[in-house]
Amino acid sequence: EIDFPAAEVPEFACQGPGCLFKSCRLCKQESHPNLKCEEVTQQAEHHRHRVEEAMTEAALRSCCHCLKKGITVRFQKSEGCNKMQCPKCKKDSCYVCRAAIPREVGYAHFCQDPRQPGRPCPKVCGKCDLWDHKNQEEIEAERVK
């Protein structure tokens, strides 16, 4: 058996039955015959950063009341119900559908059917849920997949 230095023969092909996966012996990543290891790492970092940015963007909300005035106020839900209050103008909006909630509507914007947490509305009323049964980060991660 001849052992070649990784710099001379950077690609390793698994000889396992049905596998034949090719990997780089230098960086231990999937084989990248036309790219240097550093370039692969940079591309992976760039992709990871873009995914993180997209997930953050999906979780952020803008106040629809302030936007009408040309003011951008962004906030993110970390816990609690889906009735959100803008930190600047103190007006309410729905975290789920992003609609403005007039003061006279208030909690009537949300499903009023009593139910166990995490269960869907038995009447399928079409209104937004007041509470999410999952962690907000899990919901957003599933949504942006």
Image (cartoon, rainbow, N blue to C red):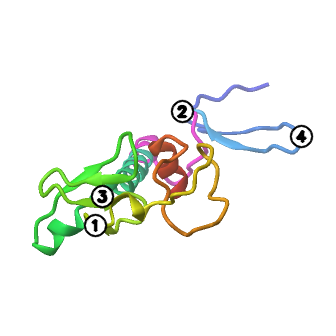
Image-quadrant location for residue 38: top left
Residue 108, image x, y percentages? 41, 63
**What mark, if any, has residue 104 been given in the picture?**
1
Q: Position of residue 102 (x, y in %)?
A: 27, 68
**Which residues, given as a range, are shown in magenta?**
27-42
Q: Residues within 10 Å of mark 3 (few under 14, many from 20)?
A: many
SS at mark 4? loop
N-terminal-most mark, 2 or 1: 2
Q: Residue at x 43, y 42 (%)?
A: 41
Q: Residue at x 59, y 28 (%)?
A: 5
How far is disc 1 from disc 4 in space, using C-alphas? 68 Å
Instruction: Work out how far the residue at label 2 is from the one at label 1, CA to CA, in angstroms.
Output: 65 Å
Discs 3, 4 touching: Cβ within 8 Å: no
Q: Quadrant of residue 21?
A: top right
- Of the two numbered discs 1 and 4 on the same chain, state the one appearing first in sequence: 4
How far apart marks 3 and 4 lie (CA) works out to: 50 Å
Determine which residue is flagged by label 2.
26
Q: Quadrant of the N terminus?
A: top right
Kindly indicate whether the residue at mark 1 contacts the one at mark 2 (C-beta within 8 angstroms). no
Pointer 1 or 3: first along the chain: 3
- Tell me the crowding category of disc 1: few under 14, some 14 to 19, or many 20 or more residues within 10 angstroms, Cα based: few
Based on the picture, tell me whether residue 36 belongs to the magenta stretch: yes
Q: Quadrant of the C terminus?
A: bottom right
Q: Which residue position is annotated with label 3? A: 61
Label 4 neighbour load within 10 Å: few <14, some 14-19, many 20+: few
> SS of the residue at dot 1?
loop
Task: Tell whether label 3 touches label 1 (CB within 8 Å).
Answer: no
Residue type, mark 1 in image: Glu
Question: Which mark lies nearer to you, 2 or 1?
Answer: 1
